[in-house]
Amino acid sequence: MVQFARHGPREFPPARNLTGDAMRPLKRTLYPCAVSPNEAAAVLGIRAEQIKEAVRMGALPVYQLGTKRRVLIDDLVAWVRATWKRS
């Protein structure tokens, strides 16, 4: 399981069964769908400059809301598959 700097897995609070039976907790783990370039580099074990260079070259799309930049996990996986050699 990957832990991120500020965004770790989260769990929903226990919910009631819709049939009215005894309370049963439902556990669901949530993972972030987007990470910062620095967090992306940490997950992949590479330098942040490599992620930022891929963003500058247009190889890795980045989304921005205000001053926050985020890389979608799906885009990160696609970038790794397209650029890294498989061993």
Image (spheres, helix red, strand yellow):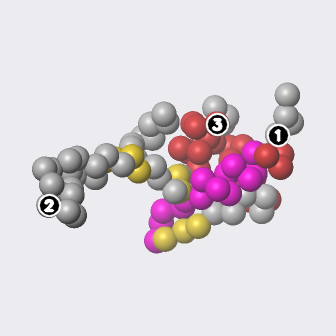
Query: Quick check: 83 left or right of 7?
Result: right
Secondary structure of residue under mark 3? helix
Residue occupying the far top of the picture? 87
Residue 15: image location, x then y, percent: 21, 56
Residue 66: image location, x then y, percent: 46, 71
Residue stretch rendered in magenta on the structure: 66-80
First-in-chain label (3 vs 1): 3
Residue 71 picture quarter: bottom right
Secondary structure of residue under mark 2? loop
Q: Is residue 6 visible?
A: no
The magenta stretch spans residue 73: yes
The CA distance from mark 3 to mark 1 is 11 Å
Which three-letter amino acid code belongs to the residue tagged 2?
Gly
First-in-chain label (2 vs 1): 2
Which three-letter amino acid code belongs to the residue tagged 1?
Trp
Query: Quick check: 75 left or right of 63?
Result: right
Query: Quick check: 33 left or right of 16?
Result: right
First-in-chain label (3 vs 2): 2
Numbered circle sitting on residue 20: 2
The CA distance from mark 2 to mark 1 is 52 Å
Near mark 1 (Cα within 10 A), the count class, few <14, some 14-19 or many ≥20, is few
Depicted 83 relative to depicted 19: above or below: above
Which three-letter amino acid code belongs to the residue tagged 3?
Leu
Q: Between residues 25 and 20, which one lies in front from this camera angle?
A: 20
Residue 87: image location, x then y, percent: 85, 28
